[in-house]
Image (spheres, helix red, strand yellow):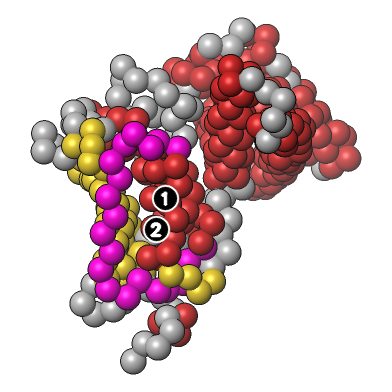
Amino acid sequence: MSTCAVAEYIRGQKQAISADWERAVVAELRELAKLERGALIDHMPEVLEGLAAWVEGRAEDARASFIGLADGHALQRLGFGIELAVVNIEYRWLRSVLLQHLRAVPSSLDVREQLIRLNEGLDHAIHFAVRRYSEQRDLVRDRFIGILGHDLRDPLSSVAMATHHLLRSEALSALDRSRVAMIERAVARMERMVADVLDFARGQLAQGIPVSIARADLAEICRAAAEEARGVHPQRTIELELRGDLRGAFDRDRLLQLLGNLLSNAIHHGEDPIRLEAWEVEDHQAVFTRIRNRGLPIPPELLPNLFDPFVQARKEQKSGLGLGLYIVAQIARAHGAIYQVSSSAEETAFTIQWPRTPLGEVPDRT
């Protein structure tokens, strides 16, 4: 055998190694089974050549192949929308297939040392690919959030400002005023949708919706949320019930958004009266909010995934993007709150337990 038996074997068995790896990943990963064969295999020959070079001690030549893997294979997978976890499983199978094949190489101290270098080379290749994938994904995320935060919001703000001024004009006829008001409502809805998608992007790609915790009164927040919902839906009955001292440490704007989403969900999917309740527990260490409505129950099969993105509370109703409850869950988690939903023929209720921590944030508490 050659003094570098492992590298020689890899070069001689490239086709067989690639074929076995292809069968393994296609069998396990349905995301890859959908790819054309050229896209599936792409840089595998270059990767194997790079690994052989690494085993031989030609680190610079190997790194060139590994960078090719990162710039080609990893970014191609990202372009196809394939998750990083799937890419990692691809590399796990490559390691497994390689080691299975290399059992055919007669063992010796030198061969065992070469196998150690092979694993080091694989680790380097995976590191380059995962880092490149992550960097490009973050770049796409930042661009996406930038487009939502600026390129879409600014034109909507201009339209909203124009409609506001038009509605104040005495020159408009009653018919024109109603048309401008319709535009104003549509713009407000689009702004909410943009905000929801922006929060979704932050929650999915930036590890959670950011919150700014400060002293706040949940009673005041609930009153504001109920009043806002009544203003948008004056024909609906929205009741408010507050009990106990509801001061604590919250992000007021985020809680207002959360309660608004839950009230909107109840209004669109439920029947009156819509009831918003908030109360303090006896030991003063937590407060609760609950939004209840009557109407058809949520189908049991939807309950386990109701807070996932793009899920609708009713299959037959397709209002909005299905992000409202996902954002509710993200805001609750950011506060360390516990959220749950129950639904029966009598009523549907969304309940959240808000921790009152730190206790020092609660004024006048003994």
Residue 198 lies, in percent from the top left, at 61, 39
Residue 153 lies, in percent from the top left, at 71, 36
**47 or 360, which lies in front?**
360
Q: Which mark is residue 165?
A: none
Residue 98 lies, in percent from the top left, at 59, 30
Give the side of residue 258 with respect to residue 274, left or right. right
Image point (66%, 27%), residue name:
78
* Residue type for callout 2: Arg
Quarter where residue 332 is shown: bottom left
**Which image quarter is the C terminus in?**
bottom left
**141 or 123, which lies in front?**
141
- Secondary structure under badge 2? helix
Residue receiving disc 1: 227
* Residue type for callout 1: Glu
Magenta segment, which residues?
232-251
**17 or 224, which lies in front?**
224
Q: How many marks?
A: 2
- Vertically, is 238 above or below 180? below
Quarter where residue 243 is shown: bottom left
Q: Which mark is residue 223?
A: 2
